[in-house]
Amino acid sequence: MDVDIIRKQPAGQRVQPHLLDYEAACAHFSWDEARRALDGLPGDLGLNIAHEAVDRHADGARAERHALRWRGRQGEALDLSYAQLRELTSRFANALAGLGVAAGDPVFVLSGRIPALYVAVLGALKHRCVVTPLFAAFGPQPIATRMQLGQARVLVTTASLYRRKVQALRGQLPALRHVLLVPDEPGELPPDTLDWNALLASAPTRYAIGATDAQSPALLHFTSGTTGTPKGALHVHQAVVAHQATARYALDLHDGDVFWCTADPGWVTGTSYGIVAPLVLGLTLLVDEADFEAQRWYELLERERVSVWYTAPTAVRMMMKGGIQAARARRFESLRFIASVGEPLNPQAVRWGLEAFGLPIHDNWWQTETGGIMIANFAALDIRPGSMGRPLPGITAAIVRRHEDGSVAVLDAPDAEGELALRRGWPSMFRAYLHEEARYARCFAGDWYLSGDLARRDADGYFWFVGRADDMIKSSGHLIGPFEVESALMEHPAVHEAGVIGKPEPTIGELVKAFVALKPGFEASEALRRELLGFARTRLGAAVAPKEIEFSPGLPRTRSGKILRRLLKARELGLPEGDLSTLEPP
Ligand code: ATP
Ligand code: MG
């Protein structure tokens, strides 16, 4: 694959000045110093995420600044200042106290992106509960399973979601004491529930956050379930140190920005960067209630004067599919920085950003387990399309190989392929997989956290995603990462997206098979299939190129937007489909 480079001209940009010299920034960075950029609770009572995100801004110069700019599905709008957000979250924290809910109790929030979701998450953090935002589109069973696993004591949801998804399963949730409903439909609330509005209205407006140990649990997040059953990753209050520092570095956030993170808080991105980080930095956070729709998104970017935009490859690919004209018809005058996470960002998509927005798209890499961005294409650094970028200051990343005895060897040679590992000890590192101690222990070897992703690092220190360890294909003695094959196919004008798997084959081990979804205006045909096979062979060579291509109207993906290769494979081989709780319905 061509390694073309998108050159940056740092002088003309609003990059964090201390990042202009990346090597120096890394050399001088310390997490202790990053911690000192935060306030801590008054009276030395520790570190609490909600204090850093809300209360500390609510008295000073930012009191009247919009913390949340909410845009509803039907065109409704609500803007909340930091002062207003403090009051609402304090009311909720007081309401929890009034119900006898204690610090450490698990609080689940199940709702679309409505203002109450943000109030509930931050208010529960104030009261030092352990918060889990759940994706509202989950079906009843995935909701119940996660609530059982997390022993939810409190649930905040809407009346309609409760009626459709939780009420019938309440018998399976013995730990659940309090259900708070945001009334969103006419009629009485169901029995054994409380009215969110009434509860907040009668609660006191001031709440003094109690002593919070920075190491105490704050957020429980389930992984996307791309490779199997989702795991519950537990994070502590100290994670906020990383949220703050990584957002400044990797997302180039500055005072005065309007920031839009398109991820739902049901996924870690939607909490770390869709709630916490921008508020900790005292910015204005745009929240859109609606689902992806290209025209709506272009309009929001333009009208709301978004300056920094954090999205995902699947959305970028959908916009690409709709054609460049829709983007060109708009003026994104305020937009300064675009970043993407969740899946590999194909080089094609990085470059499309330049055409559509006049800005490249900056890929970055992290996981539910890491709690925050670990590797990124920075504002000041040249971009290598297809690369995840370089480790953040404070983060040591390496390529390692695991030995049989559990130890690991660091592979220093440029371009050596191996497992992507991080030196443990950054503040937002997960502290447990809930109820799965052995699985948690297996993620570590000595000083290293092992990510389960394969990657390589080039001679200049850029990291390149190769594939998930589970998705790697072994064909005629080669180890092939699906991303490389998918990206090559996507260079063809007819291809909207591709998912590549290994299919067992007796002589070569596994055969590379690609599932391809076409752009509008292209018809699946034998001629096109052969053209794509040839196209891929020219780019990748015969050993790596797919031997089989199957056209598919769309690819199965998780609700967080990741291609579910394990499902493509299971279907291809007629095997059980496994955990599908996070599958996005076609
Ligand atoms: P599960 O662990 O349940 O299988 P998951 O790994 O998809 O699901 P997440 O924690 O949401 O759950 O996703 C993290 C994973 O997403 C990473 O390990 C990596 O495989 C992939 N990923 C995230 N960002 C990138 C990126 N920029 N490039 C390539 N892959 C990425
Ligand atoms: Mg994972």
Image (cartoon, rainbow, N blue to C red):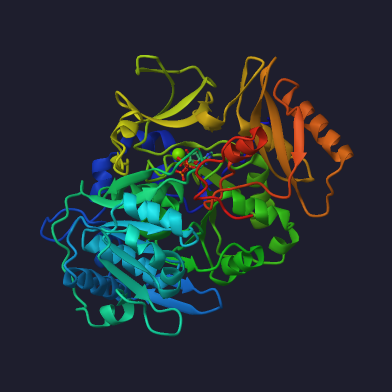
Give the quadrant of residue 563: top right
Give the quadrant of residue 256: bottom left
Could you tell me residue 342's position as x and y percent? 52, 45
Observer able to see residue 123: yes
Residue 280 in the figure: left or right of residue 452: left
Q: Nearer the viewer, residue 363 or 524?
A: 524
Could you tell me residue 464's position as x and y percent? 55, 31
Q: Nearer the viewer, residue 133 or 427?
A: 133
Extreme residue toward the bottom, this view:
187
Residue 423 in the figure: left or right of residue 413: left
Q: Nearer the viewer, residue 468 or 38?
A: 468
Could you tell me residue 392's position as x and y percent? 41, 39
- Say above or below: 229 vs 163: above
Residue 206 in the figure: left or right of residue 344: left
- Say above or below: 382 vs 68: above
> Where the N terminus falls, by quadrant?
top right
Residue 311 in the figure: left or right of residue 30: right
